[in-house]
Image (tube, coloured by chain):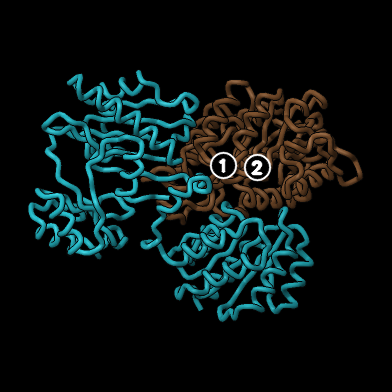
């Protein structure tokens, strides 16, 4: 789960990271009032789950409250990488002397949090890692001991020459690690971390992604979920316990298992069609889940055919067939449905579907070709 | 032969009294796995009744279970909040292999558990995996026993149902398996492709290897380089997620393209450049294995 900059800043502040104050506005008038309270120059920043906000014109300096209002009225409602901006953060502008990059992410290869710092701030770290790796200092944190004082100091030494700044930065790095751990994050980043002309180290931007598996035990973080910029179908799917991603095609897919679901989408494409979604109904044969899946798929006006691909391993085909038959009784499906059912109790499953008026295939390739054909008809 | 498990596998089930744990314990026993003990804190002294009436003793902790039964392997069905601790408890008990089925384990907790197990020389498979099966010998996890057959193919996969798909085709073509390993869909897993490739290369009964990957991470790319340098047996590969959009999690926690890294194209290219035959469709996997063995 991605959270907004202002939310990440709340998490950072809670861990002690020096973050300048800031308030959220949802209207230009609110932005003006906040700017007036802060006084002086402020920055108006789009809050949206996407990078590249500055380049898109979503971050603007305002020298007066009136200017803050004007910027806010332009930024609110604008689209950045397809996501509509609903909120802006208004924060006092800082006197920046230098900019640095500090980030930590859960590294798959070393199976531990990996810190990356660079004296070149405000940059795209992936790009620097690829083109100028010597500009980055990296440190693997042993997750059992956490960030040790000398490690934070070693990282900070790559950023500044001034002992006072090194000391402050070392503390910020340790605090950032604490925020990462306390939030159950998979990534936390300060870009840029600045030193001010008066010699203070501060985080003026913040980015954080939360491990979805942590949310059950961190309700305060889970409450930060903002569904306003995601398709309603994805919100509904999550509430129903389904794994769903909306795509642009017209073949609605309902599959058990994530790997098979991806392979099914790929096969739709292979046979000249376009998948409308990724959907994993999991091992469940619960009719309620099948119904929720069908409701979500049929609510998409692009969908012209619905494809089920079920491999009964532990899940029994007759159970799934009952789920589909029951769902068909409860909701009126106007689109053609093709079903592939194979594995445990396949004969019983196919019979149940036949009695409910569906024909079932046992080959994945046949059923996908049929679905693509129906979607084109 | 087989890798990681065989007829001598003596299994403890952690979470044996839970819904999934009890169901799959019966399935494993029906398949012929030696289930010697179960662990559920607070239920020590009770017994679990197997399919043919066999009584499996239940213990409060892994240490007692291993001391009393000589178990060498454990399988974990406990809920996500307790799964990382269950891995560490198992790693401290003397078993050499821990198979973690549980999906949704917090990744930071797993990072600690993996480090803990590694220090003790204990192999972890998973979490978020279907487990491992050596046809005719033993199954640990949830892979369906009825679709596998004994034979010369070693199979390793990040996915569950896609594995079943490939296994069924292999079996239908008369190509049985030495061992099928589901390594799991999480970002941090205990056993990766390279570990399995090394074990299959060393196993004299394995004549060909199937490797099923998906988007996210760089495990497949490293495995491809490993194949070129170290594997003499033919390898057939498949990658799921050609149509997956970047930045979106496709069901599995680890199945996500981050930035420009971890795409299906890049993995397919790595396979092809390193001499791995790539199946375009799942249905082509078994045919490629057959040609490689001919």
Q: Is residue A249 visible?
A: yes
Chain name for mark 1? B
**Chain letter of disc 2 in the image:** B
Q: Position of residue B223 (x, y in %)?
A: 53, 34
Q: Which chain is brown?
A: B
Percent x, y for residue B117? Answer: 60, 26
Residue underneath mark 1: B105
Residues packed near mark 2 inside 10 Å, few (<14), some (14 to 19) or many (20 plus): many
Residue drawn at (71%, 57%), measured in percent from left and top?
A315
Q: Which mark is residue A187?
A: none
**Residue A355 location, quadrant:** bottom right
Instruction: Tell me what residue is drawn at x 36 percent, y 20 percent.
Output: A149
**Mark 1 and mark 2 on one chain:** yes
Report the mark closest to the observer, 1 or 2. Answer: 1
Q: A352 or A250, which is in the foreground?
A: A352
Instruction: Please tell me which residue lies in front, A86 or A33.
Output: A33
Which residue occupies the extreme front position in the image?
A37
x, y percentage for residue A34? 18, 55
Vertical side of A14 occupied by A311: above or below: below
Q: Quadrant of residue A353?
A: bottom right
In cyan, which chain?
A
A355 horizontally vs B112: left or right: right
SS of the residue under disc 1: loop
- Give the residue drawn at x 56%, y 62%: A240
In this view, A198 is above or below A242: above
Identify residue for label 2.
Answer: B101
Question: Is label 2 in a helix, a strand or a loop?
Answer: loop
């Amino acid at each position: 789960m991605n959270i907004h900059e202002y939310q990440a800043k709340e998490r950072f502040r809670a861990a002690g990271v020096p973050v300048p104050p800031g308030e959220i506005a949802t209207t230009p008038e609110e932005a003006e009032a906040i700017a007036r309270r802060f006084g002086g120059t402020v920055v108006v920043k789009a809050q949206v789950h996407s990078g590249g906000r500055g380049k898109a014109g979503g971050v603007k300096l305002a020298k007066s409250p009136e200017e803050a209002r004007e910027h806010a009225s332009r930024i609110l409602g604008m689209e950045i990488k397809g996501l509509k901006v609903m909120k802006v953060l208004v924060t006092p502008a800082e006197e920046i002397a230098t900019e640095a990059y500090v980030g930590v992410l859960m590294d798959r290869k070393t199976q531990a949090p990996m810190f990356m710092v660079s004296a070149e701030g405000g940059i795209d770290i992936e790009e620097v890692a690829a083109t100028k790796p010597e500009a980055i200092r990296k440190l693997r944190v042993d997750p059992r001991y956490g960030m040790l004082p000398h490690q934070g100091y070693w990282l900070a030494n790559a950023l500044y020459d001034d002992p006072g700044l090194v000391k402050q930065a070392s503390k910020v790095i340790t605090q950032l690690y604490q925020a990462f751990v306390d939030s159950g994050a998979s990534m936390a980043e300060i870009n840029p971390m600045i030193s001010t002309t008066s010699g203070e180290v501060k985080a003026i931007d913040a980015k954080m992604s939360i491990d979805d598996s942590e949310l059950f035990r961190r309700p305060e973080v889970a409450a930060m979920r903002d569904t306003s910029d995601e398709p309603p179908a994805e919100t509904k799917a999550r509430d129903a316990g389904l794994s769903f991603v909306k795509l642009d095609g017209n073949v609605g897919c309902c599959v058990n298992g994530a790997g098979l679901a991806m392979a099914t989408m790929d096969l739709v494409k292979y046979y000249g069609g376009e998948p409308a979604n990724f959907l994993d109904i999991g091992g469940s044969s619960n009719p309620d889940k099948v119904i929720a899946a069908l409701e979500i798929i049929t609510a998409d006006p692009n969908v012209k055919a619905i494809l089920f691909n079920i491999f009964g391993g532990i899940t029994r085909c007759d159970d799934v067939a009952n789920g589909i038959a029951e769902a068909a009784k409860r909701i009126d499906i106007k689109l053609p449905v093709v079903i592939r059912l194979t594995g445990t109790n396949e004969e019983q499953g196919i019979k149940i579907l036949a009695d409910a008026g569906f024909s079932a295939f046992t080959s994945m390739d046949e059923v996908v070709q049929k679905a693509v054909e129906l979607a084109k008809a | 032969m087989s890798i990681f498990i065989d007829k001598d596998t003596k299994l403890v089930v952690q979470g044996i009294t839970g819904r999934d744990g009890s169901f799959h314990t019966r399935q494993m026993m029906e398949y012929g796995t030696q289930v010697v003990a179960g662990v559920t804190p607070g239920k020590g002294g009770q017994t679990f009744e197997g399919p043919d009436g066999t009584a499996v003793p239940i213990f409060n902790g892994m240490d007692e279970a291993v001391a009393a039964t000589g178990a060498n392997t454990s399988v974990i069905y406990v809920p996500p909040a307790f799964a990382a601790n269950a891995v560490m408890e198992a790693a401290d008990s003397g078993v050499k292999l821990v198979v973690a089925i549980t999906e949704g384990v917090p990744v930071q907790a797993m990072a600690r558990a993996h480090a803990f197990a590694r220090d003790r020389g204990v192999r972890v498979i998973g979490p978020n995996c279907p487990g491992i099966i050596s046809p005719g010998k033993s199954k640990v996890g949830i892979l369906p026993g009825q679709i596998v057959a004994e034979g010369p193919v070693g199979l390793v996969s990040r996915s569950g149902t896609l594995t079943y798909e490939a296994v069924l085709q292999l079996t239908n073509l008369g190509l049985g398996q030495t061992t099928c390993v589901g390594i799991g869909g999480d970002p941090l897993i205990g056993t990766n492709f390279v570990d399995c490739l090394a074990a299959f290369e060393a196993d004299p009964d394995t004549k060909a290897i199937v490797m099923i990957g998906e988007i996210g991470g760089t495990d497949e790319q490293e495995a491809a380089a490993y194949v070129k340098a170290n594997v003499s047996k033919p390898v057939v590969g498949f990658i799921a997620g050609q149509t997956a959009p970047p930045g979106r999690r496709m069901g599995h926690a680890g199945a996500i393209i981050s930035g420009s890294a971890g795409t299906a194209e890049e993995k397919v290219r790595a396979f092809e450049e390193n001499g791995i035959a790539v199946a375009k469709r799942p249905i082509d996997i078994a045919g490629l294995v057959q040609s490689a063995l001919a």
